[in-house]
Image (cartoon, rainbow, N blue to C red):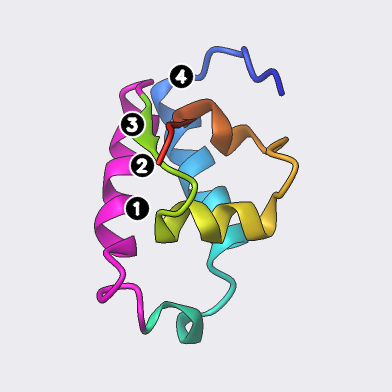
Amino acid sequence: MKHKKRLTKIDRFRFIASWLNYAVPSKDTVESWEEDHIGADLAWLCLAIVNDGKCEWPKDRPLVKLILKKDPKQRAAIWRFIDLVPE
C-alpha cells in the first residue's frame, strides 16, 4: 500500500470530493452517522487530507469499519491519511 504522490491543495479537495462520493453513495446511508460520530470523524479526516496529516484510529472505530468494508485490503489512497492503532 504505497501512495506517495504529493497532492496540491486543490488535488486534496478533489480527492475528498471523489472519496466521499465513493464512500457515501446516497443520503440514505448517512442517517445513523451522528450517533456513531462518523460525521465528526469525517470532518477530522477531511482536515487531515487538506493538511497532509493523519488520523490515528483503531479498527473498531465506526468510520474505519465503513472504510474497511469498502476496501478490506487497504489499497485505496484514503489509507495514506489513516494510521490504524491498537485497540
Q: How crowded is mark 3: few (under 14 residues within 10 Å), some or many (20 or more)?
A: some
Q: Are marks 2 and 4 in contact (CB under 8 Å)?
A: no
| Image point (57%, 53%), residue name | 67
Viewer-closest of 40 and 15:
40
For marks 3 and 1, the one nearer the N-term is 1
**Which percent across, then down, holds residue 4?**
62, 12
Residue placed under numbered mark 2 in the picture: 45
Q: Mark 3 points at which residue?
A: 48
Q: What is the x, y in percent for residue 18? A: 57, 50
Q: Magenta includes 70?
A: no
- Of circles 4 and 1, the one toward us is 1
Q: Name the residue under label 4.
A: 8
Asked if residue 10 is positioned above or below residue 58 in the image, the reply reads: above
Instruction: Say what amino acid the circle numbered 4 marks.
Output: Thr
Mark 1 is surrounded, within 10 Å at the Cα level, by few (under 14), some (14 to 19) or many (20 or more) other residues, namely some
The numbered mark at residue 54 is: none
Q: Is the residue marked by circle 4 packed among few (<14), some (14-19), or many (20+) residues within 10 Å?
A: few
Q: Give the secondary structure at mark 1.
A: helix
Look at the picture and state if 13 lies above or below 30. above
Report the Cα–Cα distance between label 3 and label 2: 5 Å
Cα gap from disc 3 to disc 4, whole angstroms: 14 Å
Displayed quadrant of residue 60? bottom left
In the picture, the quarter occupied by the N terminus is top right
Residue 28 visible in the picture: yes
Residue in the image at 56% along x and 50% along y: 19
Which amino acid, by three-letter code, is at mark 2? Answer: Leu
**Magenta span of residues:** 32-53
Query: Which quadrant, please, contains the C terminus?
Result: top left
Q: Name the residue under label 1.
A: 42
Q: Earlier in the sequence, mark 4 or mark 1?
A: 4
